[in-house]
Each structure stands twice: as C-alpha cells, then as structure tokens.
Amino acid sequence: MRAARWRTRNGGWALAVALTLGATAGCGGGTDARDADRPTAAGTAKPTGTGKPVGSESPTTPDTVLDAQALRRALPDLQSMPTGWRAGLVPLGVRDVPEAERCRKDGEPQENCTLHGSRGMAQYRPQGDAGVVDITLLAYPDLRTSETAYRNRTGSEADRGSALSMPRVGNESAAFAHPRAPYAGPNITLTVRVGTAIAGLTYQDADKNPDSSRALLSVARMQAKRLLQTEQGRPATAIAE
C-alpha cells in the first residue's frame, strides 16, 4: 500500500498516519480535555483577532458562547459526511460541563478543571477498512479563553508529534502527525478554533488511507463552517465536499 507523505515545518517528512484524538481506543478522543484545557498558558496567549475562516461568508466570527444543544446542531450527522462514510462506535453526543468542574476565574488552585463549558463528540468511518475519524467540539465562555485553550492544546500536540503543513482552517488551526504507539496506530490530529469554540479532529490508523490528510482537511473545513453558522445563529447546513 502506498504511503502518503507531507512535508513538515522543519523540512523533513512525516509518514501519513491516522487522525486520533488520543491513544485510548473506544474513548472517542485522545488527550483528555482536562489536561489540555488547564489554564497553563494564561497570560501568554496573544490575541489573534477573529479573521475570516476558510470558506466562510462572514468577515468576522461572532463572540457567541455555545451550549451543549448548540454543539449538537454544529456536529455533523452522517448525511453531512462524505459519500460512503458510516457511523463509528462512538455515537454523536453532547454535554454541558457542571459548574463545579470548570476552572475558577479568580486564580485559585483547582485540580482537574476544564476551561470549556460544553462538549460534543462524534465518530465516523471512511469507506472500507481505512481508519476512523473522531470529532470533538469544545465551547468556551469567551474568545480570550478559547485562544488560551487553543494554545494549550496545540502546544501539547507539538510535544508529541511532528507539525504538518496544511491550509488554515477557521480562525487558526494546527496539524500534527503522530507515530505508531504501543496501544495506537499512527494518526493525524487537526485542531481548529472558530470563534469561541475549538474542534479537535483525529484520523486514527491514517496509514490505511493514502489520502487521509485530504479527507481530514475536508471534514475539518465542513466542521468549521458548521460552527460558524451556529455562532451566527443560522442553521448548520455545511457538508463535506
């Protein structure tokens, strides 16, 4: 089977690997949001502005806070995915994080807290035995917090994988390739921020699909559009091309 390759930022090459949000199979994701979203980058995140997300019709992204039901509308159903894809083992689901589990704004120490207030998840399988794509949406209370969380998450990914050069999606995005691990196949992760929300996409067992990076990018663009539509108060109608 032919292996797809992408050029990394340091000029080397990274083997195409499956996008996964984490190494734990069946959990619908990789790095736990409680770790990635702790405010370790507080005071260091630089404002990035709202920018124009790829494929959007609006020059700016609203400072809209999404709850669990809004994330449900933003998550893609099977009809929004590419032709021939099917649902994975993790069903589409959303939840609001209890107030007691959210990080305090007064700076008091708090273990295992999260910066996000709502969370949504879904999993889909491409045609054939070609890996699995996990999607996790996290909604934050404001733009500044989402920017901090984005830097926390992408900084953590950079410590474990090789940066990949991909077109920007949403307000800001970052992609990383991860080698095979003891309990997980090679994967690719793509983190996208759209306004106050972050989408984390993982292609697990990416080496099974020579076009895994292209497929992941298509899904990420669709997800960014659906988040923007939801933040604008419009129906989420975007589908993967």
Image (tube, rainbow, N blue to C red):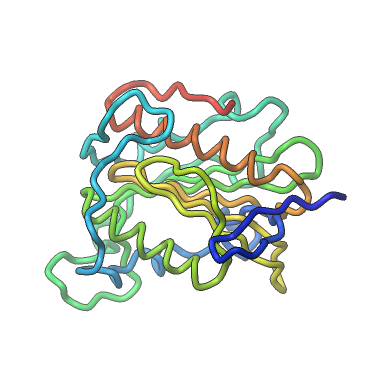
- Find residue 235 and report its horizontal and vertical position in percent: 37, 21
- Find residue 234 and report its horizontal and vertical position in percent: 32, 22
How many numbered marks appear?
Answer: 0
Quadrant hosting residue 15: bottom right
Q: Nearer the viewer, residue 163 or 231?
A: 163
Task: Judge whether residue 119 can be spotted in this image.
Answer: no
Residue 26 left/right relative to 230: right
Quadrant hosting residue 171: top left
Residue at 49% across, 46% down: 121
Residue at 76% across, 46% down: 210
Residue at 60% across, 63% down: 11
Vertical order, 129 against 73 (above or below): below
- Find residue 23 and report its horizontal and vertical position in percent: 62, 65
- Find residue 223 and report its horizontal and vertical position in percent: 47, 36
Residue 144 left/right relative to 236: left
Vertical order, 96 against 26 (above or below): above
- Quadrant where the image shows the C terminus: top right
Q: Nearer the viewer, residue 10 or 84?
A: 10
Vertical order, 136 against 161 (above or below): above
Furthest residue to the left?
A: 106
Task: Judge whether residue 103 can be spotted in this image.
Answer: yes
Residue 102 left/right relative to 207: left
Q: Nearer the viewer, residue 229 or 116?
A: 229
